[in-house]
């Protein structure tokens, strides 16, 4: 059977992505608010910003894919229960798509500390996935 997507499903997805966009960088958040919140067409944004329509469409699709990924969902749902350092690294790496080096510089941590925290978060995500599959 082929699954169909209704307009209410699309609106629900858009609302979920817009809520999660609070965690991304301001330019990404603004793009999502324009397209998903205000209904501005990618063609209009492209004309004003000087990039191709295809580039805008790819950016939006990439952000939607990232913000609806189960790992990002889990990070956003559970980060408040984690130690501040772990939470900050998880948000930077999984939600904001920072590199290890950028995360290290932004958070004032050594690269070694960031790697340790990434390993810890990977373990927490794996455990969370196993928990939800039960």
Image (cartoon, grey):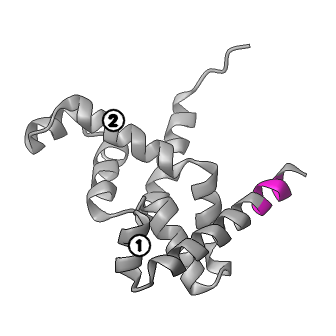
Question: Residue 26: percent from the left, percent from the top?
Answer: 29, 64
Displayed quadrant of residue 58: top left
Q: Which residue is mark 2?
A: 58
Of all residues, the one furthest to the front in this rendering is 112
Left or right, 60 with reference to 117: left
- Image height check: is 98 above or below 104? above
Q: Which residue is mark 1?
A: 103
Tell me the chief SS of the magenta region. helix
Q: What numbered label is drawn on residue 45?
A: none
Question: Residue 90: percent from the left, percent from the top?
Answer: 55, 69
| Residue drawn at (55%, 84%) of the image | 85
| Residue drawn at (62%, 78%) of the image | 80
- Where are the magenta residues, as a range? 127-132
| Residue drawn at (36%, 48%) of the image | 37
Mark 2: secondary structure: helix
N-terminal of the pair, mark 2 or mark 1, is: 2
Displayed quadrant of residue 43: top left
130 falls in the magenta region: yes
Label 2 to label 1, Cα distance in Å? 24 Å
Does the CB distance between marks 2 and 1 fall below 8 Å?
A: no
Question: Residue 92: percent from the left, percent from the top?
Answer: 45, 68
């Amino acid at each position: 059977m082929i699954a169909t997507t209704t307009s209410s499903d699309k609106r629900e997805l858009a609302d979920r992505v817009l809520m999660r966009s609070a965690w991304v960088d301001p330019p990404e958040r603004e793009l999502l608010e324009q397209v998903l919140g205000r209904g501005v067409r990618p063609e209009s944004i492209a004309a004003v910003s000087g990039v191709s329509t295809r580039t805008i469409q790819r950016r939006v699709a990439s952000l939607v894919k990232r913000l609806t990924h189960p790992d990002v969902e889990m990070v956003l749902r559970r980060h408040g229960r984690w130690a501040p350092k772990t939470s900050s690294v998880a948000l930077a790496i999984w939600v904001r798509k920072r590199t290890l080096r950028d995360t290290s510089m932004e958070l004032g941590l050594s690269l070694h500390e960031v790697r340790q925290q990434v390993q810890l978060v990977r373990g927490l995500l794996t455990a969370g996935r196993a928990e939800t599959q039960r």
